Image: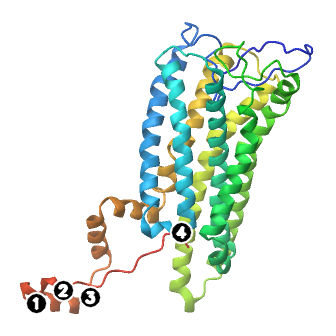
Amino acid sequence: MAQIFPTPPGGDDMPPPPPNGGPDGGGGGGPGGGDPMSSSSSPIEIYIYLYGYSALFLVGLIGSLCSLFTFSRKTLRSVSTSILFVFLAVSDLGYLFLLTHDFFIYGLRLTDYYYVPLCRFRTFLSKFFMLFSAWTLVLVSVDRWIRTRFPWKSKKYCTLKYLLVCILIVTLVSTGLCSHLLTPMFGDSKITQMCVGNTAYPIYFAFFGDVWAYLFPVAQSIVPSLLMLAFLVDMFTIIKSRKRQLQPQGERRSRRQIYLQREMFILMLSSIIIFFLTTVPSAVYNILLARHLLNQSTLTSSELPAILSFILGVNYAINFFLHCLTSQLFRRQFLSSLCPTFINFHRRRVFPTSLAQTNTQSMMPIANTTLQRSPLPEVNVVA
């Protein structure tokens, strides 16, 4: 939340650090500053933390578990994009579990026993999951971009080996950027109910207010959004040009590839739109707050951060429904994992047997019903 911080040792010209319990999550400060049981909290803020966060957690929990269940299937585990979605679901689920702290403290109005090491660890995990989820979406965009622009190289680079290397790099970089939150320089036992830079370390206190306030929003929201938008525009150009170059002799194969790429394009488009709409507002808010361009008014210090926190949580709660259910191919995989009988019946209706086969089978005796039809070929969910 937007807080008024004490002046650190070293002068009044040192800017205060941004809040850590604000819309970017992971702090220990109560709404509007001070005791979470304070009566200064507005009803809108209490309703957001009580009903909004509970809805986010339930929807996100169901979506993340369904995502793990769907992409962990044997037919999808060999696809690099599906493995990325598994890591994304785990990261989103971890962030949603951290939101339960705000639900209990600011929604149910329970007493918050401030403990500096726990506050450091909670803040670290929150920032880590936010960075990891953002750059995992970038890896999804890169994976789809390689398969679109360089389809002949996708079998070489879009493999599990390169995928695990990229995930390891993202994990190490995210951990390194957030590692300072685990040090004694972060968290002041003299300032209760919120995690801020320790005033006993003036250099870190200045870094926390001058550098980290801008570094984290840019690394977590601005840069990933621009990269995903660049990959998306290039993919759209490639798909459009290949559609114009469609030749009659390869019409069936080309149309199928265009259909698969269009499904992936819709999947990426929905991901980028929801990521941009939910993360950029909170990033801009924190940058403006660090630059002292926002007044410490009631709306700024209480209601607006709660609203932006809820909007930010939407990105981690509905990823499954956007990444899976907006694509017809992924929706079929999800439904087939839940009800294979329904999917087989649907396939028989969509791909009926020939008339000769139907007449032949109708003349067979009932005793020959043990004969099995040849299974339909599996349709790969990615290009």
Residue, x 42% and y 51% (percent of image)? 66
Q: Residue 371 carries which label?
A: 2
N-terminal of the pair, mark 1 or mark 4, is 4
From this view, report whether residue 41 is shown above or below residue 283.
above
Of residues 200 and 310, which is closer to you in this image?
200
Look at label 3 and name its amino acid. Ser
Helix, strand or loop for disc 3: loop
Instruction: Work out whether 207 lies above or below 80.
Output: above
Q: Is residue 173 left or right of residue 260?
A: right
Q: Which amino acid does label 1 sit on?
A: Met
Residue topped by disc 1: 364
For marks 3 and 2 on the same chain, the one whose residue lies earlier in the sequence = 3
The percent coordinates of residue 251 (x first, y second) are 54, 86
Query: Is residue 266 shown left or right of residue 68?
Result: right
CA distance for labels 4 and 3: 33 Å
Question: Who comes first in sequence, dot 4 or dot 3?
Answer: 4
SS category of the residue bearing label 2: loop
Residue underneath mark 4: 79
Label 1 or label 2, whichever comes before in sequence order: 1
Q: Do the residues labelled 3 and 1 touch (CB within 8 Å)?
A: no
Q: Where in the figure is residue 310, as x and y percent of width and height?
A: 56, 31
> Which quadrant would residue 175 be assigned to in this image?
top right
Picture quarter with the C terminus: bottom right
Q: What residue type is labelled 4?
A: Val
Q: Which mark is residue 354?
A: 3
Residue 356 appears in the figure: yes
Mark 3 / mark 1, whichever is N-terminal: 3
